[in-house]
Image (tube, rainbow, N blue to C red):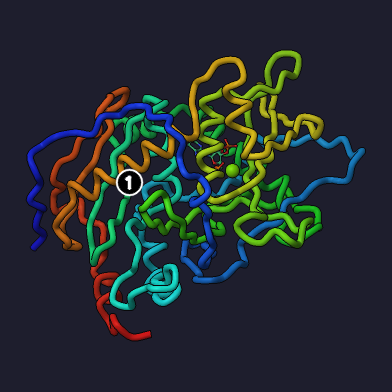
Amino acid sequence: MATCGAVPEAGGLDIDISEDAFPFEDFVPKELGCFSMDKDRKPHINNRNKLRYLYTPPTGQGCEYKLRDGYNTFQKLDDDLEERLDNIMKWISKNKLEAKKYKDDFKLQSLNTDFVSCRGHFTKIMCTPYVKEEWKMAVTLFDGTYYISEVATEEKKAYEKNMTDKEKEMGYWGYKFEQYRTSQVDGQEPDTNLPVNNSEAFYTVVRTDLKNHSLLYSAEVDCCETSNPDLQPPFNYVEIKTNKIGRNKYKFVHPFKLLKWWAQSYLLGIPKIIAGFRSEDSIVQQADVKPYLTCNIPKIANETRKLWNPDGCMNFCDKFLKFVKDVVRRDDPKVVYIFERIKGSKTVTYKEGAAGDIFVPDWYEVKMNQNKDCV
Ligand code: A3P
Ligand code: MG
């Protein structure tokens, strides 16, 4: 039977902005492994087959990218599929030693990791002090490691249910641009007549330290580039984005959109983002594709008005992770705590989860307890 945790007196975490200098030098994501998701969304552990290569058309080829093309053949990932942390858990369970190795003095009996999650969840947490967006995270402490798994809010469910056909189609445009600018074979022009599918994907698994918290997470990677052989993963990965072009072809990305681009790429150590600026009716001209260096994004976004700051993002993330460690005390895979940020709220609240919130699967518990202290 599922049980719930005994939670300390209800209280919340203030969402404030602390822009004291954050020790960025310790935040160096290291790739421990990877997995490729096939068209049936089955993970292939430590398989790099689905990693695509950045494709840059020859100069002088004034091509245009029609992002609407092929929408009627879009093979869309089922939105109702709840993968939770299952894929990174599969990676961990098959790579116990790699996962456990932390600095030189790692212990075999535990994962030697404070937090396991997905990159996207940390992106949301990092952006919290500067944006109003709501989120809900389920947290379970299992064998000394806190597992953080996002739960869809009622607002998100309602938004998805009421999306217009145009909104649904616009969700395709970004994937179509990825198809135009990435190739399965390095240097080969992509076949853009093939249907786009967003089930197949490549994920990296990285470890890093965020102040005194050790983190292990997975993240989807759009593509890599091979022009600089000195750059090893994750530093040769490239993120691809689209954005609406302004009047007179003014290439401006809203500062808060840049905040998300920055946080998402910074968490993986991705140095470069390729942005395609599209017209109202979804066409990107080759001349309107602009690369951004992730490290320059904070400066670009805050040029006219100081709206956000990377230290503020990281300090809040540190504060939230400390809060989780304070609140979640019972080490039990069947105990869940729900942390929630309501839209626009200045507080993160928490409560005990119910049996239906449990997300650590039985198979993972069994695998992690098997031959625990053996190499
Ligand atoms: P854009 O970001 O260019 O719009 P990612 O950039 O994270 O790799 O995501 C790839 C694409 O998935 C996005 O491209 C967009 O088309 C789609 N996408 C991602 N998150 C989405 C969301 N919350 N709503 C709608 N579409 C989304
Ligand atoms: Mg992308």
Q: Residue at x 14, y 54 (%)?
A: 355
Horizontal side, residue 29 vs residue 133: left or right: right
Q: Is residue 370 above or below residue 238?
A: below
Q: Residues within 10 Å of mark 1 (few under 14, many from 20)?
A: many
Q: From this viewpoint, is residue 38 visible?
A: no
Count how many numbered circles sit on residues in the image: 1
Identify which residue, 329 or 175, lies in the foreground. Answer: 329
Q: Position of residue 362 (x, y in %)?
A: 23, 69
For image coordinates 61% across by 32% down, the residue present is 297
- Residue 91 relative to residue 324: left or right: right
Q: Position of residue 294 (x, y in %)?
A: 62, 39
The quadrant of the picture occupied by the N terminus is bottom left
The local secondary structure at tag 1 comes to strand
The front one of 105 and 360 is: 105
> Where does residue 332 sit, x and y in percent of width and height?
16, 62
* Quadrant of the frame with the C terminus: bottom left
Can I make out residue 157 in this image?
Answer: yes
Q: Which residue is mark 1?
A: 150
Q: Is residue 113 above or below residue 189?
A: below
> Of the residues shown, which amino acid type is indicated by label 1?
Glu
Q: Residue at x 65, y 49 (%)?
A: 238
Residue 141 location, quadrant: bottom left
Observer-nearest residue: 338 or 101?
A: 101
Mark 1 CB in 8 Å range of ligand 1? no
Query: Is 22 positioned to the left or the right of 297 in the image?
Result: left
Q: Is residue 351 above or below residue 223?
A: above
Q: Position of residue 192 (x, y in %)?
A: 73, 48
Ligand 1 - quadrant of the structure image? top right
Figure quadrant of residue 107: bottom left
